[in-house]
Amino acid sequence: MRRESRFLIIGGGPAALSAARAYRDAGGEGEVRLVSADVDRPYARPPLSKEFLRGEAGDDDLPLVEDSFYRDREIQVSLDDPVTHWDIAERRARTASGETVQYSQCVYATGAEPQRPPIDGADHPDVRTLRSAQSGRELREAARNARSAVVVGAGFIGCEAAVSLSRLGTRVTLICPGPAPQHQRLGAEAGREILGWLDSEGVHVLTGTELTGIDRGHRVSTDSGPLPDTGLVLLATGVKPRAELAERAGLATDQGRVMTDEQLRTSAADVYAAGDVALACNAIAGRRLPVEHWGEAETMGEIAGANAAGEHRRWANAPGFWSVLGDRVLKYAAWGDGFTEAQLIRHGDGAFTVWYGQNGTTVGVLTHEADEDYERGAELVERGAPLSPRT
Ligand SMILES: Cc1cc2nc3c(=O)[nH]c(=O)nc-3n(C[C@H](O)[C@H](O)[C@H](O)COP(=O)(O)OP(=O)(O)OC[C@H]3O[C@@H](n4cnc5c(N)ncnc54)[C@H](O)[C@@H]3O)c2cc1C
């Protein structure tokens, strides 16, 4: 089967959906095809480690838009059918089912996939990862039958899932390679706060500990010794951008991501990249930034879709991220590629702000119950304001 298609979107996450929406909103005409490897239509991933895992949200809460959205905007969606071949010179993509799609404009938004550490037993089928709604359903089912769990990795997803599992009544051990969760990304001050929260949620955190092996999916060993057998092992050990198809097709990549300019244009004419898979140039930062945030995937998708329809928008804001650990919300706006100083300011009743600086310039802000600082902080980051002592 061969179909003519004007606007092709490869991917089925928030960046892909935003691209489709923005293309139509900007007056983009012709056929719009969204081709996804996922079995589900675009849905919310953030609840998978939070309300969905705890059973407070169900399948019906996940879709990002109603089915009528696609009908009304004439957006055709193919599911469970990844693009496997891509001929950029011919502007043609082929899917696993053998369908060929010809396009005039294309957005590449294939996101990222969980990365399993290269240790014995990490690929055992009972060892879980969390990315798709399907993996979320499987994790929730496995959690129902487990009295204890080991979560490996103390990034946002590992910490969120650990708290959710603990709230389900599961005895949770979190393996954290650094001295505190998020130590490298957010600094020692923020790490200590998160550690305190995890402790208060009943999560047992093994800091400074490395995973060394997993036997038969339930016996975890670390560099400080073996852990008791557990009913559930979840690897939250980072993600790998899905850039292989783009690389094979000849798009320029760096750090395993597809390079773009400020308008999210790739090295190929009329091909844009957006979301976790993109290494986009931020117009204000003046450099390319790897970003793995939900809101940024939506923003980039929107820019790419509008530009495919003929606009000239630029990616020009400080990337923002929210994380929810049980009931505690962390908000983070930052360039995210390093800092040399971090100042923690307490506001009372547990509220705090951490200001991040790079050689005297504000490059990030992290807040808990300090929304004004979050809003102000994003603006200071974008302005490159001096990092002066703040209260
Ligand atoms: C459990 C969890 C909780 C999270 N919580 C937060 C949060 O609280 N806040 C936050 O900011 N971020 C959060 N994130 C991160 C956020 O979900 C990602 O940054 C965001 O989903 C990236 O969007 P994307 O569209 O770039 O890629 P993805 O959402 O990964 O979507 C990519 C899509 O492309 C499809 N695809 C891949 N290869 C192909 C192919 N060859 N052909 C066709 N389709 C393909 C995939 O099936 C998928 O549907 C969370 C992530 C997870 C997993």
Image (spheres, grey):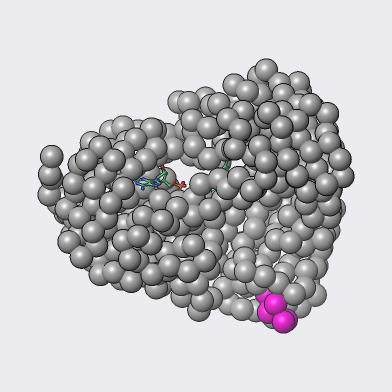
* Location of residue 349 in the rendering, given as x and y in whole percent from the top left corner: 84, 48
- 309 relative position to 289: left or right: left
Q: Which residue is drawn at 36% across and 55% down?
A: 245
- The answer to whether residue 117 is seen in the rendering is yes
Is residue 148 inside the magenta stretch? no
- The answer to whether residue 70 is seen in the rendering is no
Is residue 360 inside the magenta stretch? yes
Residue numbers of the magenta segment? 358-362
Q: Residue at x 26, y 44 (%)?
A: 95
- 129 relative position to 179: left or right: left
Q: Which residue is drawn at 45% across and 53% down?
A: 242
* Location of residue 172 in the rendering, given as x and y in whole percent from the top left corner: 78, 32
* Location of residue 102 in the rendering, given as x and y in whole percent from the top left corner: 16, 53
The furthest residue to the front: 120
- The quadrant of the image that shows the N terminus is top left
Task: Find residue 143 and report its image quarter.
Answer: top right
* Location of residue 285 in the rendering, given as x and y in whole percent from the top left corner: 53, 76
Task: Find residue 319 and report its image quarter.
Answer: bottom right
